[in-house]
Amino acid sequence: MYYVYVLRSLKDGRLYKGLTQNVEKRLNQHNQGENRSTKGFKPWELVLTKSFDSREKARYYEKYLKSGSGREFLKEIL
């Protein structure tokens, strides 16, 4: 199973979108500063997850969330 996840920084409210097979482990990595692009904005909270049966489908949805219309969608639901 593959998961697309969205994190919100408790420091400044910015969102981070990613893909993983283990959401809990990945959230811990972000909060421990193991990801260079999120390190300066920790702590992070998990605000959205969606599961997919293939990496291809998950990657497609992740790309959508990172697009302009995907960002607008997230503004509406979060």
Image (cartoon, rainbow, N blue to C red):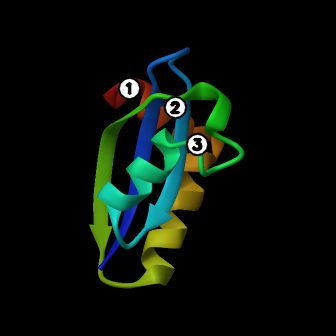
Q: Nearer the viewer, residue 39 or 67?
A: 39
Q: CA distance from mark 1 to mark 3?
A: 29 Å
Judged from the image, the secondary structure of the residue bearing numbered disc 2 is helix
- Residue to which mark 2 is pinned: 72
The crowd level at tag 1 (other Cα within 10 Å; few <14, some 14-19, many 20+) is few
- Residue to which mark 3 is pinned: 33
The crowd level at tag 2 (other Cα within 10 Å; few <14, some 14-19, many 20+) is few
Residue name at image x 61 percent, y 48 percent: 66
Residue name at image x 52 percent, y 31 percent: 72
Q: Earlier in the sequence, mark 1 or mark 3?
A: 3
Q: Amino acid at mark 1?
A: Glu
Coordinates of residue 13 in the picture (x, y in percent):
50, 18
**Badge nearest the viewer, 1 or 3:** 3
Residue 45 position (above or below residue 55): above
Residue 52 position (above or below residue 10): below
Task: Please indicate whether residue 40 sits to the left or right of residue 58 in the image.
Answer: right
Q: Nearer the viewer, residue 16 or 31?
A: 31
Judged from the image, the secondary structure of the residue bearing numbered disc 3 is loop
Quadrant where the C terminus lies?
top left
Q: Which residue lies most toward the front here?
A: 32
Q: Amino acid at mark 2?
A: Glu
